[in-house]
Amino acid sequence: MEYEHLLVEIDRGRCRITLNRPEKRNALSDPLLVELEHALWEADDRKDVHCVILRGAGPDFCAGYDLSGTGRSEREGYREARSIDDDIWQLERNNRRIRALFEMHKPSIAQIHGHCLAGGTDIALMCDMIIAADDALIGFPPARNLGALPNNMWIYHCGPQWAKRLTLTGDSITGADAQKIGLVMKAVPAKLLEAEVEQLADRLVLIDPDLLSANKRIVNLSMELMGAQTVQRLAAENDARGHRAPATRAYFDAVKEKGLRQAFRERDALFGDSIARVDRAEIRDDKGHLVEHED
């Protein structure tokens, strides 16, 4: 398969998959997700690959789903999300593509820098290990007015309270704070991020792939017994329900009237800097920006 939206490199026992739409901040489109699923299973099939590194080109890992409509072809007689079942069907299809990261036998590492938002968190949290730059920003702002999360692994990483705190508000968290709550495995200075990921891949390459598979799968099967796979199916149905909320309808009206960028800008302006803190009080000014203070 020829990849248009990914860079795929096999090197020293690892497969580096780079989201390659930097002009779109690596936004997830239908064609990109088709390519990603193919690249993941191809890497899983190759005997010379022990692990996968998932990363993004340009200044961001992934800013979310491409809501501009580009990259999607509407075909007469096919589902177009006009009914709630159409919506659920399309969300489930995307989830199946992304779930390859969870279901493939070989381990994956997400290498997070810049912004990892919305759909970016969907793919990152499906990886087996996440290493982030300490200044990365991770969050799901569309939860504010675009429905629920269509693919939801948050509770399995950071627990119910922080999952609620971040997804109920759409606020973001830094990579450094994400490490403190277990949302990512580790956060390092941005200049050391690639080296940190590569040294972990070096160690995985020393292990027989069959043993990597056995040890990954027993952990993932434990998560499945806790409902992880079922929750992803329910998340798609729940998101379709969220798409029927008055706020979501108002958002699409705003997009038609003002354009995508302005609709986002007006929504997020209400939340100030949109940053959540983990271990310090959040005191904000009247515009929603954090104020430095003595604890």
Image: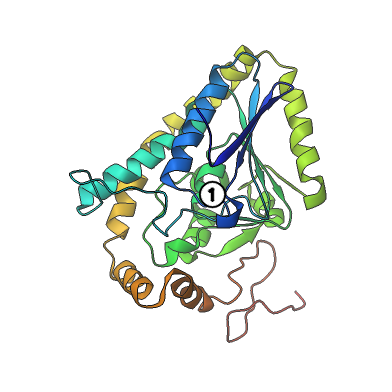
Q: Would you name the residue on which mark 1 appears? A: 121
Is residue 241 or residue 23 the one in the foreground?
Answer: 23
Determine whether, in the image, residue 115 is placed left or right of residue 141.
right
Question: Looking at the picture, how far across and down is residue 277, in whole percent?
Answer: 65, 65
Q: Residue at x 65, y 20 (%)?
A: 50
Residue appearing at x 53%, y 35% in the figure: 3
Helix or strand or loop: what does disc 1 sit on? helix
Q: Is residue 259 above or below residue 153?
A: below
Q: Is residue 209 left or right of residue 201?
A: left
Q: Please tell me which residue is depicted at 45% across the width and 62% down the height of the picture.
A: 142
The amino acid pointed to by label 1 is: Thr
Q: Is residue 149 visible?
A: yes
Residue 276 image position (x, y, % from top left): 61, 66
Whether residue 230 is situated above or below residue 291 in the rendered picture: above
Residue in the image at 39% along x and 35% along y: 96
Indicate the quadrant where residue 157 lies: top right
- Other residues around mark 1 within 10 Å, as few (<14) / some (14–19) / many (≥20): many
User: Residue 152 location, x and y as percent?
Assistant: 45, 46
Q: Position of residue 64 (x, y in %)?
A: 50, 54
- For the C terminus, the quadrant is bottom right
